Image (spheres, rainbow, N blue to C red):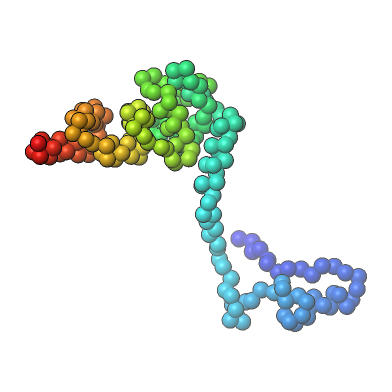
Amino acid sequence: MMELSLDIPCSSSSSSSSASSCHQSPTGPTSQHSVASPASGGIKQAKEWLHHADHHTVDSFFTMDLMRKQKLLCDVVLKVGDKAIPVHRLVLASCSPYFHAMFTNEMAECFKSEVTLHDIDANAVELLVAFAYTSEIKITEETVQYLLPAASLLQLHSVRDACCRFLATQLTPSNCLGIRRFADTHGCFDLETSSKQFAFSTSIES
């Protein structure tokens, strides 16, 4: 393997005095370019240097989200109801097994510029697409009922689990049985258990 020399050459000059200055002692003008050698007991030469940019991923996804909103380099449009949502296949496939299978297994959707999603709430898809780019989503009493089924369908498990935890904090004697049925329908076993236990404890107290 060819070795790369890290010696810093002197700049050429017609003046012999300036040329000779390149060979002055480390305390002279060239000391700013000197590199301590292992033999002199100075800093050891690094064989390799791993650089990690702490904010690289966050900054990259922030830029991709801006590009999505500006419809730049988007390669597919999700049609959901009356909404058309431009997205980047790579971003969705990277965080959703549902989209990963759709866009990588030579299904018909791989080659379409528009993909229609059925049996899913359009507002939920908009929120979940934004989550794919930002890793943030706001769950409220109004959105949780359509976010949870959509997150389950698109296999965004962290959102589904967050919806379940949110619903667990909303349990009351009047809604615990309804939440239990809702949890059972969508396979949220922890929420189903919590609502069942809540209903049982409420019936004992009454």
In the displayed structure image, the side of residue 151 where residue 186 appears, left or right: left
Q: Does residue 9 appear in this view? A: yes
Q: Kindly identify the residue that appears in the image at 48 percent across and 40 percent down.
A: 134
Of the pair 169 and 82, the residue shown nearer to us: 169
Q: Kindly identify the residue that appears in the image at 31 percent across and 39 percent down.
A: 166
Q: Does residue 161 appear in this view? A: no
Q: Kindly identify the residue that appears in the image at 66 percent across and 63 percent down.
A: 4
In the displayed structure image, the side of residue 174 where residue 142 appears, left or right: right
| Quadrant (top left/top right/bottom left/bottom right) for the C terminus | top left
Counting from the top left corner in percent of width and height, residue 80 is at 44, 20
In the displayed structure image, the side of residue 128 where residue 31 appears, left or right: right
Of the pair 183 and 116, the residue shown nearer to us: 183
Counting from the top left corner in percent of width and height, residue 86 is at 53, 26
Counting from the top left corner in percent of width and height, residue 51 is at 54, 58
Of the pair 14 and 129, the residue shown nearer to us: 129
Counting from the top left corner in percent of width and height, residue 132 is at 45, 36
Of the pair 194 and 128, the residue shown nearer to us: 194
Which picture quadrant has residue 126?
Answer: top left
Q: Kindly identify the residue that appears in the image at 49 percent across and 34 percent down.
A: 90
| Quadrant (top left/top right/bottom left/bottom right) for the N terminus | bottom right
